[in-house]
Image (cartoon, helix red, strand yellow):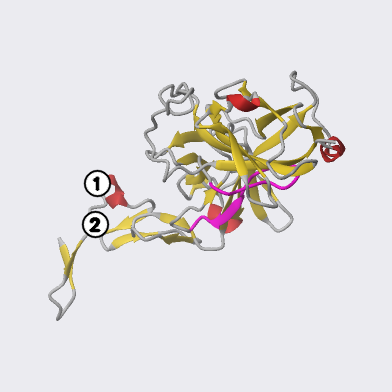
Amino acid sequence: MKICLFGISLCLAELNCSVNNGGCSHKCSPAGCSCPSCWSLVKDNLTCLPSPGLAQVTCSASGISLQVDECVLGGRADPTFLDSSCTSEINDEGLVEISTDLSNCGTIMEFLDSDDLLKFSNRLVAPSAVRNGRIVSRPLIMNFECLYSTRYENITTNYSADMNSVAVTFDMATYDVPVAALGFGLDFFTDSTFGTKLTEENMQGGIFVGNTLHAAVNSHIFIEDLTFTIERCEIEDPSTGVSLRIIDDRCPLAELGVEIFKNHDQRSIPFSFQAFLFPGQENTGIYDVKCHLLACDNTNPDNECFADPVCGGRKRRSNISSKTKKYIAISKRFNVLNV
């Protein structure tokens, strides 16, 4: 059957609501899809999402959180994530709040086809609303997702190399999900056991030329099935812009006694190198260490993190052009002395 407008030769096909609910996520009628109160159709005219301003998602390195206006629930009580042990609460503003880290509450991790984006998805669920003993609504199923980059460029931490993360908050009604970032840090240690961190006072006191610096890149948040590798590290003089790569294409610079103790790891990758001064700086230098990381699927042994680096003059073949590679970059500053 068709619905035609009088005087206009345009006819719109009716929806067949008996087949897959006409493609509608909620209410279906021959004239089209519609949404319950506090929900609105998005661009596809099939899917209902909470109306603008009524539901927000925050994606950060530490996890995912939702804030939802109670009217979106339509009388449904006690919403949870897929894991029903992850319950919600009402905040002081009367909004429903619920949160999880990136490995719990039924959250699903997926690398998208390009491997440049990492998706974490879950859903807010609640049983049907009941009034006077009668069921007056369907169960609530509200899908949401967070996207995280696996590669970045020129994003550095502050002096203390605290959390290198970018949190994003967006309205659930948005059609384009913004991209957040994971959290990593770079620390120096007193010796090769990597057990005790050097303090800021130690670092400001300086490291003598020829002494070994022990460093490690650490993931601030453990994420199940996620690993990372150091693609490159460089020492840079911020006053001149002169730099030297001590790790390149996952290979250490032998001339400086650079050692990398793990090719990839889920928590920490330690490495060491000898302190040096750039030409023209005879007594002291203040340098930055900058490391560029790549996050990978720990369950897939065919990805770049698991590939054995080919060093000693031969370049490791990569399936990603060097012009398009982007990495997570972290940095830390140290003083070198020759007096």
Image point 45% across, 29% down: which residue? 304
Residue stretch in magenta:
153-173
Which quarter shows the N terminus? bottom left
Residues at marks 2 and 1 touching, judged by CB atoms closer than 8 Å: no
Q: Quadrant of residue 318?
A: top left
| x and y percentages locating residue 58 in the rendered image | 60, 50
Image point 68% across, 29% down: which residue? 216
Q: Which residue is label 2 attached to?
A: 15
Q: Which residue is label 1 attached to?
A: 19
Answer left or right for 204 relative to 28. right
The correct choice, above or below, for 24 with respect to 328 in the image is below
Q: State the predominant SS element of the stretch in magenta.
A: loop
Image point 71% across, 41% down: which residue? 332
Magenta region includes residue 155: yes
The correct choice, above or below, for 2 with respect to 143 in the image is below
- Distance between the alpha carbons at the discs numbered 2 and 1: 9 Å
Image point 64% across, 47% down: which residue? 156
Magenta region includes residue 126: no
The front one of 201 and 182 is 201
| x and y percentages locating residue 221 in the rendered image | 65, 34
Q: How many marks?
A: 2
The front one of 197 and 95 is 197
The answer to whether residue 126 shows anywhere in this view is no
Q: Secondary structure at mark 2?
A: loop
The three-letter amino acid code for the residue at tag 1 is Val
